[in-house]
Amino acid sequence: MKGFYYFMWFAYVMGASGALYLWWRLVKRIKARYIRDLLLGFVLFMLFTPWFATPQGVELAPALIILAHDLAFGSEGNSLRGLLPIASGFILFLLVLRPCYWIVAKKGLNSSGTSDNNLGN
């Protein structure tokens, strides 16, 4: 049974990687770097955040699947337990992304070779 568990995770990671690639191809045309990176980070955390599938905490499942299951079928007690890891991971992502943009703007490390202090462009 453990082999099937790993196979399902492998299949999910491959499918989510394909979805993330398609999303990246869609949003790479957005000129505003900060908005583009926020959208990519949001989808990244939505697809790849694991969380405990059972209240006992034995096996993991994608938090997005747990959130959808809880919304559709209404589990007892905490019905949005899949939202907690997604939201906390995305907030952490925001807290790391902003200083990274500040460092890039201050040091002039952007890919075009010019310093661009306007983070929205």
Image: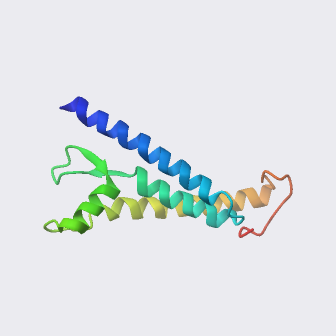
Give the residue displayed 41% in from the left and 42% down from the top: 13
Q: Where does the image place residue 39, in percent across and percent down from the top left?
A: 55, 63
Q: Where does the image place residue 82, in percent across and percent down from the top left?
A: 30, 61
**Up-down: is 85 above or below 58?**
below
Q: Residue 26 is drawn in which quadrant?
A: bottom right
Q: Where does the image place residue 15, in percent across and percent down from the top left?
A: 42, 44
Q: Nearer the viewer, residue 38 or 23?
A: 23
Left or right of 30, for residue 7:
left
Q: Nearer the viewer, residue 103 or 77?
A: 77
Residue extending farthest left? 76
Q: Residue 27 is drawn in which quadrant?
A: bottom right
**Quarter the N terminus occupies:** top left
Give the residue displayed 84% in from the left and 60% down from the top: 115
Q: Where does the image place residue 33, in percent across and percent down from the top left?
A: 68, 62
**Up-down: is 94 above or below 10?**
below
Give the residue displayed 30% in from the left and 39% down from the top: 8
Q: Nearer the viewer, residue 40 or 115?
A: 40
Q: Residue 120 is drawn in which quadrant?
A: bottom right
